Image: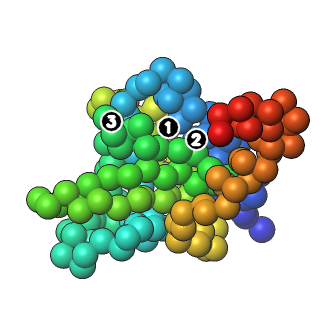
Amino acid sequence: MTINLLQTVEYKAIMTEHITKTIGYLFSKDQDFGLACEVKHIDFNPELPNDLKESFNETVLFILSGYTLESAKLEEGYFSFEAGFGPDNFDSVVTVPLLAIKQILVGDTPIVLNFSEPSEEKKPAYTPDTTSSKNSMEALLKNPENKKLLQKRK
């Protein structure tokens, strides 16, 4: 029985780590880069208008520079960033499973090629974390010295 080595759990783990480390390296060098991604796996929040979504091919190229690069972040198994689309610069958060990234390019040079496919499970749509500021304040107040500093400011 022949198996497709590029779709095994082991190979997908290798590609996920390679993509993660490559993007992390590009972040550390403040390097603009491009991503060629499969549209069917991408989440947009808010959802793009139909005329914009219909203008995409099966694979779309995103160029990350300026604010788009500054807004980019790696999360467990996903890459996300903010981007503007179309003539009206419709703003949306783009979330891509790492294995839906088929190429990473610097300039015109592909530096990562990925032939594996993401699993079928989709990440829930982006929702702002309303608990983080509360958790941050709780962590801050656990230290008695911080409590003293905050009381002095009143």
Residues marked 1 and 3 touching at CB (< 8 Å): no
Pointers 1 and 2 in contact (C-beta within 8 Å) = yes
Residue drawn at x 22%, y 70% is 52
Residue beneath label 1, please?
Answer: 112
Nearer to us of marks 1 and 3 is: 3
Q: Quick check: 96 above or below 146?
A: below
Q: Provide the residue designation for mark 3.
A: 65
Indicate the secondary structure of the residue bearing disc 2: helix
Sooner in the amino-acid sequence: mark 2 or mark 3:
2
- Image colouring: rainbow
What type is the residue that disc 2 sits on? Answer: Ile
Farthest residue, direction bottom: 50
Mark 1 belongs to which amino acid? Val
Q: Residue at x 30, y 71 (%)?
A: 48
Which quadrant of the rendered structure holds the N terminus?
A: bottom right
Q: Is residue 40 left or right of residue 6?
A: left
